[in-house]
Image (tube, coloured by chain):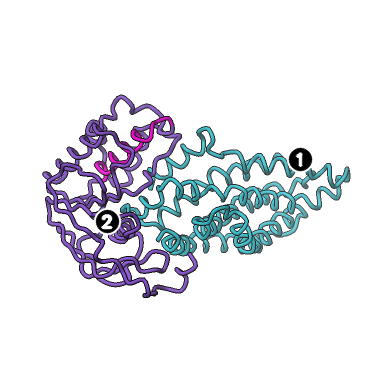
Chain colours: A purple, B cyan
Amino acid sequence: MTLRVTDLAVARGGVPVLDGVSFAVEQGAALILRGPNGAGKTTLLRCIAGLQPPLSGQIDGAEETIAYAGHADGLKAMLSVRENLTFWAQVFGQRDISDALAAYDLEPLQDRLAGTLSAGQKRRLGLARLMVTGRPIWVLDEPTVSLDAAAVGLFAAAVTAHLGAGGTALIATHIDLGLKAHSFDITPFRAKPSQRSGASDEAFL
Amino acid sequence: MIALLRRDLMLAFRAGGGFGLGLAFFLIVTVLVPFSVGPHPDLLGTIAPGVLWLGALLACLLSLDRLLALDYEDGTLDLLATAPLPLEAALSVKALSHWVTTGLPLVLAAPVLGVMLNLAPSGYLWLVASLGLGTPALSVIGTFGAALTVGIKRGGLLMSLLVLPLYVPTLIFGAEAARRGAMGLDATTPLTLLAGITFGTIALMPFASAAVLRMTLR
C-alpha cells in the first residue's frame, strides 16, 4: 500500500500554509516529516488522515487505511488501560490487545485507571492504540512528546516491527528516532502569505 | 457501535460521569413547583402535564453540554472520525446513550412526580407515552446542537439558544398529548404528530449532526 501525495495545498483557519507538497511513501517504508513549529506539519497530517479537506491536490491510498495519532490520545480518565484499549480495538473490528500491551510495556498498568497514569504512560497507551487498529498506514504527529529514552526505544521498535510486517508510517517529529527512514522537509513548500482562499466560513473559525 | 454505546454508558455511570444530573434537576423542579404555585390541588392538576414536560425538556438540555465536549477535548472525536464507523452512526449511538442516561430515567420518574403535582389518574398512561415518544427527539436534536457548538469554549449558552427553538414542536405536541390525556380527551392526534417528529429527527438529524461535526473538526 503506497501513500502518494501529489501537489497538495492545505490551509489552516482559511489561511494557506503549504502549497505544492508532493511525496510518496512505499509499503514497508517510513517517512519523517521535518519542519519548524508552525510550518504546517499538523495541518498536513490532519489533511492526509481525512480530518480536513485539502485546498487542492490529491492524496492516494489513504481511504480506510490510516491510523492517526495526534497530540491528544483520546483516552478516558475513568476507564482502565485495558478498557481504553479494548474499546478502540472493537471500534476497528479487532480483538487481541495483548501484543499492543506487551509492545509498550503496559501489562503492569493494565488495570489502572487512565486518569492516574503519568503523561509518558498515557502517551504509551495512545501509541499502543495504533497497534489495535489493524490499519497499514500510521500517520503520527509528534509521537514522542513526553516519552523517556526507554519509551522512545519501545516506540522505534514498534514502528520497525510494523514496517517489517508490510506497514507504512508517516511521522512528524523533531528528534532522531533511530529509524531507517527518509526525511522530508516541508519548509520550502510554505504558501505565499499574500494568498487567501478557502470557504468564507473558515475565515471566522 | 455496540462498543461505543457500552463505553459511553460505562463512563456515564462511573464517578463524575454526569448520570443523574438531569434526573436530579427534574426532581428539584417538580418538587419546588407546588411550593411556588401554592396549595391549590386543582390548579396543580391543571398545570401538571405542562410542568412535567417543561422540566423534562430543561433536564435534557442541561446535560447536552457534556455530550460531545468531553470527547472533543481529549481527541476522541478526531480518532472516531478516522475510524471505520461512519460519523452518522457514531452520533446516533451518542444520542442513544444520552437518551438512556437522561431521557429514560425522566420517563420512569415522571409518574411518581405526577402524584406530587396531583395529576389526574387518566393522565399517567398518556404522560409516560408522550415522554417516551418525545424524549428521543430531544436527545437527537440536542446532539445536533452539541455538534454545532463543540469547538467553542463555553458554548453552552449558544447551544441552548440554538436548540430551544428546535425543541418547541416536541414540547407543544408532547405537553398537549399529556394534557388531553389528563382531561380525559382523545390524545391520539398530538401523540401521532409527536411520534412523527421523533422518527423524522431520528432518521434525518444524524446526517446534519455529522455534517456540522466534520466542519467543526477541520
At label 2, which amino acid type do we have?
A: Gly
A53 relative to B162 in the view: left or right: left
Residue sitting nearer the eye, B103 or A143? A143
Residue sitting nearer the eye, B172 or B208? B208
Chain containing the residue with disc 2: A
**Label 2: element kind:** loop
Q: Residue B180's mark?
A: none
For the point 42% across and 58% down, which residue is it? B217
Q: Give the farthest residue toward the top.
A: A108
B48 relative to A170 in the view: left or right: right
At label 1, which amino acid type do we have?
A: Val
> Magenta stretch: residue B89 in it?
no
**Are discs 1 and 2 both within one chain?**
no
A15 relative to A187 in the view: left or right: right
From the image, tell me which residue sits under label 2. A35
Percent coordinates x, y for residue B143 in the rendering: 52, 55
**How many other residues sit within 10 Å of disc 2, few (<14), some (14-19) or many (≥20)?**
some
A182 up-or-down from B30: above or below: below
Q: Residue B31's mark?
A: 1
Chain containing the residue with disc 1: B
**Label 1: element kind:** helix
Residue sitting nearer the eye, A132 or A27? A27
For the point 64% across and 53% down, which residue is it? B130
- Magenta stretch in the rendered image: A116-133
> Magenta stretch: residue A117 in it?
yes
Residue sitting nearer the eye, A193 or B81? A193
Percent coordinates x, y for residue A137 in the rendering: 21, 52
Query: Which quadrant of the structure image shows residue A45?
Result: bottom left
Percent coordinates x, y for residue A150 in the rendering: 23, 31
In which quadrant will I find the C terminus of chain B?
bottom left
